[in-house]
Image (cartoon, rainbow, N blue to C red):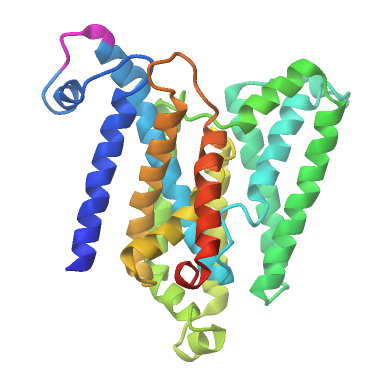
Amino acid sequence: MKTSLSFSLLFLLLGAATVLNIGLGSVWIPPQEVFQSLFQGPLVDQSHEYILWSYRAPKTATAMAVGGGLALCGLLMQSLFRNPLSGPYVLGLSSGASLGVSLLILGSSIGLPGWAMVENTGIGRVAAAALGAMGVLALVVATASRVKDTMALLLVGLMIGSITSAVVSIFTFLSDEQSLKQYAIWTMGQLGGIQGPWLYGLWILVVLGVLLSFPLAKSMNAVLLGESTALSLGIDLKTYQWMVIAITGALTGGITALVGPIAFVGLAVPHLCRIGLQTSDHRVLIPAVLIGGAIMMLLCDTVAQWPGSASRLPINAVTSLVGAPILIWLIWRRKKAFV
């Protein structure tokens, strides 16, 4: 009964966050107009109709998919490493995506041979980010096949992330001002502009990740009791590890490739859901973090829209400003928050 009430509250919050995200911005669209356009038909005010469906609705759908996907990755990582500070980027995938994009944007300005012929476009950046993330994932998978200790794998992922970050830092130091500005804008994150096939592809990726994660709930619950206990319960830890790495790698790499690096959502949301629902049962936590991640991302994007102004804050800065204090608060109440 308590779980049903908690999920009812989560769905109410999700609905409210969705209406706020669509309605607030440089142009205010009242909630009744949002509901009318969604469920009844086109609005009389054509300008509001255009803003809603051409810009805000796709951005809202993007925020929901990104938030839910990153929160799911955070839950999977925290379960795999049994480390409360694990998040979707601990394997260095975000750094790998950044390395790919930095090569595309900054390559010609730092004098890489033949790099001036590489076309710097939106599709090119997505491809570069995806290839960078996949390259790091390949290294992690190769390491996972040789290393049996999950904590050692965590350290390897962090070191790979440090190496790629160092290379990116060298590129940014050597690049010219215009290229550096383009790269800096990408690192700030961008939810707008993901439409059509890209938006469908993002949702397909997240849905596949969710469908593959639900069968892992039993293994995730068993791993919480320790690896020896999980083995005694018949859990194939190697298969479980590979599945988590594959799901997290695909989701994190795909999301970062499309919208840029988004911080703290995947790290904070699983803890908030554990506290709010007072459970460590992953059969409950998986749907909870999907909804909670979508809510957090929608609220952060609403703040980033700077309601009533044409200005827009970087979404990555907003998620950091919101997520970092939450994480500090969770550390203060460590015994209750961390499982």
> In percent of the image, x 54 and y 40: which residue is there?
321
**In this orientation, which residue lies closer to the viewer: 160 or 274?**
274
Residue 284 horizontal/vertical position (percent) = 32, 66
Q: Is 277 above or below relative to 103?
A: below
Is 211 contained in the magenta span?
no
Residue 316 horizontal/vertical position (percent) = 56, 36
Residue 216 horizontal/vertical position (percent) = 42, 69
Q: Is 251 above or below relative to 187?
A: below
Q: Is residue 162 visible?
A: yes
Is 44 contained in the magenta span?
yes
> In percent of the image, x 39 and y 65: which residue is there?
274
**Tally of numbered tags:** 0
**In this orientation, which residue lies closer to the viewer: 207 or 8?**
8
Q: Is 47 above or below relative to 80?
A: above
Q: Is 155 above or below relative to 64?
A: below
> In percent of the image, x 68 and y 76: which residue is there?
149
- What is the quadrant of residue 242 in the picture? bottom right
